[in-house]
Image (tube, rainbow, N blue to C red):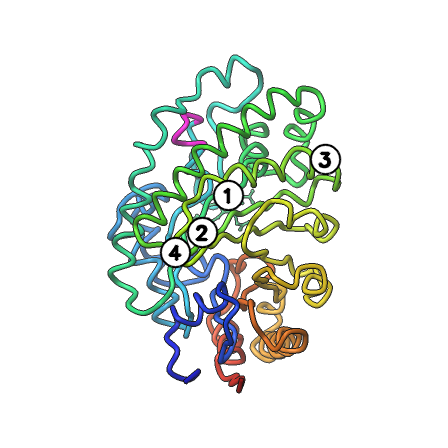
């Protein structure tokens, strides 16, 4: 029976806590600059243009599915669609990271945000999901958004950073302003996730790339309630609560409080020991967490890491509630051969029940 599972069955079975023939597999940032067709598309079209044109977004989201035996697609978009829709004017230069034209410096900046108008400006995201859903057959589909904290990091800093000191300072100096900004991000992001689920996404992931910068008690006091605010706005279905996954980069020290956010699953950073997370959260879906650097070390290293991870997944509870993935996104210099080897190492596994 297990061998008859489609990719989508396998992905949904992980959330249902049902037996798996092997872990379902997808990779964070599976579309992007390491792929040749993506680079060809970007040579002709701007980044926002790719996100906002369903045919282009679908084309680049399909490229990894054509190359690798992945069980899920993720809609092609970016977490910074939300601040852009609020009017912060986010742009991507060539080769470097995002720039925020109207960063958050004071309460007067926040007054300018167009919370009521943002959902209409994000309509393209649901259109991209609808288009991709039609194209992927029996594979699972993920929507996503950024966590309110990570969005505050970019909004306050105005660009990428190693330490996002502007946002961390704001949180300590003016927690009321930080909270109001994060509430706006949370509500617009929740609307985006609802639209993606309604358009055919099977699950949604909340990316908290910069959550690990905060100590545990600050994270618990200021960020966990914002994740919960998003999760509580998601619809439940006859199959249960909406399938939500929280990824926190560098969140090992936060692990004990992440479950309080109410998500159905946690995506583990590459530094988090799988079995420690499983011991803490026997009932949650866990996803992860091969170090993306192993892909740079070559196909053999990538396959060995993936095999070790799959053994850990099987060890504790017979391999339920797990999704194979990386511990952060694929890095641009990664080779197709390394990704293929990792995928093979996961998909050749056969768990008998
Ligand atoms: O072509 C280009 O030059 C743009 C590069 C690029 C891509 C391919 C950006 C700009 N965004 C994306 C797509 C993207 N972003 C996806 C879909 C790709 C897929 O998986 O198929 C996703 C899920 C994201 C999410 C995202 N954007 C995150 C969270 C995940 C993570 O990797 O940590 C973050 C932090 C961003 C911000 C962002 N957007 C783009 C860049 C280069 C960055 C990072 C900037 C920084 O380092 O601070």
Mark before the other along the chain sequence, 3 or 4: 3
Q: Which residue is mark 3?
A: 218
Gap between marks 3 and 2 measured at Cα: 27 Å
* Element carrying mark 1: helix
Does the magenta stretch mainly form a helix, a strand or a loop?
Answer: helix
Discs 3/2, front: 2
- Residue 271 in the image: x percent, y percent? 70, 60
Q: Choose mark 3 or mark 1, whichever is in front.
A: 1
Query: Mark 1 against mark 4, which lies toward the viewer?
Result: 4
Label annotation for residue 333: none
Q: Is residue 334 above or below residue 317?
A: above
Circles 3 and 4: CB distance less than 8 Å? Answer: no
Residue 17, x across and y down, in percent = 53, 68
Residue 231 has which mark? 1
Q: Which residue corresponds to mark 2?
A: 242
Q: CA distance from mark 1 to mark 2?
A: 8 Å
Separation of disc 2 and disc 4 at Cα?
10 Å
Mark 2 Cα within 10 Å, few/some/many (few <14, many 20+)? many
- Considering only order in the chain, which callout, 1 or 3, is on the residue closer to the N terminus? 3
């Amino acid at each position: 029976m297990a061998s008859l599972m489609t990719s989508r069955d396998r992905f949904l079975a992980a959330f249902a806590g049902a037996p798996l023939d092997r872990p379902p597999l997808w990779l964070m940032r599976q579309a992007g600059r390491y792929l040749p067709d993506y680079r060809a598309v970007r040579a002709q079209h701007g980044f926002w243009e790719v996100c906002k044109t369903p045919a282009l977004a679908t084309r680049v989201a399909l490229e990894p599915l054509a190359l690798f035996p992945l069980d899920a697609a993720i809609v092609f978009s970016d977490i910074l669609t939300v601040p852009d829709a609020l009017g912060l004017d986010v742009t991507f230069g060539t080769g470097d990271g995002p720039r925020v034209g109207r960063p958050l410096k004071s309460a007067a900046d926040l007054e300018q945000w167009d919370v009521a108008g943002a959902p209409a400006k994000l309509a393209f995201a649901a259109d991209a999901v609808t288009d991709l859903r039609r194209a992927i057959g029996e594979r699972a589909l993920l929507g996503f958004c950024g966590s309110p904290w990570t969005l505050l990091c970019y909004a306050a800093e105005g660009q990428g950073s190693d330490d996002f000191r502007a946002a961390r300072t704001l949180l300590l100096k003016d927690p009321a302003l930080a909270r109001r900004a994060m509430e706006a991000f949370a509500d617009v992001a929740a609307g985006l996730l609802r639209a993606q689920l309604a358009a055919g996404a099977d699950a949604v992931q909340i990316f908290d790339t910069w959550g690990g910068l905060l100590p545990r008690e600050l994270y618990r006091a200021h960020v966990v309630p914002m994740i919960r605010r998003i999760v509580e706005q998601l619809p439940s279905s006859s199959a249960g609560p909406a399938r939500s996954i929280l990824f926190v980069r560098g969140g090992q020290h936060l692990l004990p409080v992440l479950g309080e956010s109410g998500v159905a699953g946690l995506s583990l950073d590459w530094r988090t020991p799988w079995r420690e997370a499983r011991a803490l959260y026997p009932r949650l879906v866990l996803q992860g967490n091969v170090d993306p650097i192993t892909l740079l070390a070559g196909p053999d290293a990538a396959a060995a890491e993936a095999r070790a991870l799959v053994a850990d997944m099987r060890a504790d509870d017979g391999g339920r509630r797990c999704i194979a993935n990386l511990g952060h996104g694929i890095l641009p210099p990664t080779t197709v051969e390394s990704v293929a080897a990792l995928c093979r190492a996961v998909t050749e596994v056969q768990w008998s029940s």
